[in-house]
Amino acid sequence: MAITGLPPDTDADIARVTEALAMITPRWNVRIMLALSGPPLRYSEIAAKVSWLQNGQLHPKLQSLCDAGLLQRTQHTPRHVTYGHTDRGAALLPILPLIVTWAEEHLEKTDRPLPAIEQIEDSLTLLTRRHAAAILWVLKSREEVSGRALARIVMPSSDWTNIYPPLRQLVADGLVDSDGIGQPYRLSAAGDGLAPVFGALSAWSAGHPLAHAARHPVWGRPGAEPTPKRWVSNQSRLPAPATAPPPARAGQTPAPTWQNHDLFSHAATARPKAALPAGGPRR
């Protein structure tokens, strides 16, 4: 069923990306995915890596990620069960550095360097606002659009004035600009900078290699493939790699440019900061 007044292919594309974001945005999901970025682990080993979760919180999180197809539970014996990434879950990990790269460039700076995992969580909170993906999609493809026209496209079955709360939120978040009341809306530099992130999410959610992101009909940048750089928030704390990583085998998804300890650079036993609360200001 269509969710917008856009062509069916575009509508399905937005729906897939929105669903992908909904899989990973819930609290702790990204941290659990990263804790499992190596070999499959037993429940107790995962719990030790995410020790801030209270008893009873980890199991439903693992179950939801398994239900989403990002993790798989393998029962070797009745007393030996492990959790690890599915191929689809592993293919999602290289998108995370793209989010960090965008956050480093566009989110407001804090008075302390933020671990990359916090950059990811804050960014995901902004991208999962209600109707955010559809509004940003339309503004990217049509440059400037009035509020009334946006409403007809994004929420055709609702009263057109319902477009303004999400629009005001996106303006407050710094992703959308306008010259004032009654003036059209357009993407800000930060909103336009989401092209690699949305392009990669679109490619992943459609089952395509991430290299297809550069050819996306709305967010694509011909000649530019998504090549995430090493995150820079706490770079001085990272040890220099001793050797270059081995080349990927033919048909294998290249390893991300970060390692697990990069995103878990804060103390593993410390309770992490919550993601930016919904409705809160940009950092």
Image (tube, rainbow, N blue to C red):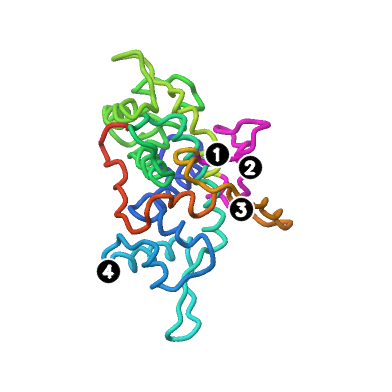
Mark 2 / mark 1, whichever is N-terminal: 1
Query: Which residue, given by chain and number where applicable, does mark 2 sit on?
Result: 212
Mark 4 / mark 1, whichever is N-terminal: 4
In this view, the mark in front (3 or 1): 3
CB atoms of marks 2 and 3 within 8 Å: no
CB atoms of marks 3 and 1 within 8 Å: no
- Tell me which amino acid carries mark 1: Gly
Magenta span: predominant SS is: loop
Mark 2 / mark 4, whichever is N-terminal: 4
CB atoms of marks 4 and 3 within 8 Å: no
Mark 3 / mark 1, whichever is N-terminal: 1
Give the alpha-carbon distance from disc 2 to disc 4, as whole Å.
40 Å
Give the alpha-carbon distance from disc 2 to disc 3, as whole Å.
17 Å
Give the alpha-carbon distance from disc 4 to disc 3, as whole Å.
32 Å
Q: Which mark is residue 56?
A: 4
Q: Which mark is residue 199?
A: 1
- Tell me which amino acid carries mark 2: His
Judging from the image, what secondary structure is the residue with disc 1 in?
helix
Judging from the image, what secondary structure is the residue with disc 2 in?
helix
CB atoms of marks 2 and 1 within 8 Å: yes
Residue 239 x %, y %: 54, 48
Judging from the image, what secondary structure is the residue with disc 4 in?
loop
The residue shown at (30%, 62%) is 53
In this orientation, which residue lies closer to the viewer: 16 or 270? 270
Q: Residues within 10 Å of mark 3 (few under 14, many from 20)?
A: some
In this view, the mark in front (2 or 3): 3
Magenta-drawn segment: 203-231
The residue shown at (33%, 59%) is 269
Query: Which residue, given by chain and number where applicable, does mark 3 sit on?
Result: 255
- Tell me which amino acid carries mark 4: Gly
Which quadrant of the structure image shows residue 64?
Answer: bottom left
